[in-house]
Image: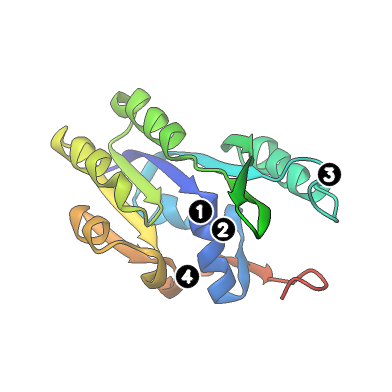
Amino acid sequence: MSRVVYVFIDASNLWQAQKVKGKLFDFEKLKKYLKSKFNASELKVFYYTAYPAEGTREYSQDGKHKFFTYLKKGLNFVVRKKELKRIVIHNDGVGDSIQEKGNMDVEMTIDALHNIKKYDTAIFFTGDSDFLALVAYIKNTGKQVHIFSSKNNISQELRTGSNGYCDILNIKEDVWGRDLKHREGKH
């Protein structure tokens, strides 16, 4: 039976797995793998990410934005991105520090619900237990929901609350790309 599959990728969750693996995903290979694994007649991928504001890093963001363009134009992903929110944390006697937040949970939830009549199977690349209610809701409409994450970044509730869980670090098929390289001084 052929089916329509929508994939929702939380880039920060995926980044944690890539760091553990020491390799980057090859998203073209990943897309082919998912299409085959789920016997999809149609596969639509949403990619959610937050990025640092210009001037907040010692390195250029050009490569990151070229990557987003590749996902959109080269692989037909829907890319949802926003600038990291910078929050000043006041610490009496110690001084202020900056915390960055870029949570995309609401955007993922909106897309999953907005498109619910268009897919048979939803795949979430996330380990966040906040998605348990969404997973239960989608399952209650008769859809299949699968979670892809890694054992060191998945909540027990989410792992057992879906129709299936896959530890992305254990995928045997060739979905990995080049080795992950660290920036100088960022090990």
Compared across the picture, whether 133 is left or right of 8 comes to left
Compared across the picture, whether 16 is left or right of 111 comes to right
Q: Is residue 159 visible?
A: yes
Find the distance from the CA under tag 2 to the CA under tag 3: 33 Å
Compared across the picture, whether 111 is left or right of 31 comes to left
Which mark sits nearer the N-terminus, 4 or 1? 1
Which mark sits nearer the N-terminus, 4 or 3? 3
Circle 4/circle 2 CB separation < 8 Å:
yes
Which color mode does the image show?
A: rainbow
In what element is the residue under mark 1?
helix
Amino acid type, callout 1: Lys
- Viewer-proximal residue among 155 and 138: 155
Amino acid type, callout 3: Gly
In what element is the residue under mark 2?
helix
Please tell me whether residue 36 is drawn above or below residue 120 in the rendered image.
below
Badge 2 crowding class, 10 Å Cα cut-off, few under 14, some 14 to 19, many 20 or more, is some
Q: Which mark is residue 32?
A: 1
The residue depicted at 54 percent of the width and 75 percent of the height is 20
Circle 2/circle 1 CB separation < 8 Å:
yes
Which mark sits nearer the N-terminus, 2 or 3? 2
Amino acid type, callout 2: Lys
The residue depicted at 66 percent of the width and 53 percent of the height is 97
The residue depicted at 72 percent of the width and 38 percent of the height is 69
* Residue receiving disc 3: 55
Which mark sits nearer the N-terminus, 4 or 2? 2
Find the distance from the CA under tag 4 to the CA under tag 3: 39 Å
Find the distance from the CA under tag 4 to the CA under tag 1: 10 Å
The residue depicted at 43 percent of the width and 50 percent of the height is 35
Find the distance from the CA under tag 3 to the CA under tag 1: 37 Å
Find the distance from the CA under tag 2 to the CA under tag 1: 5 Å
* Residue receiving disc 4: 173
Q: Which mark is residue 29?
A: 2
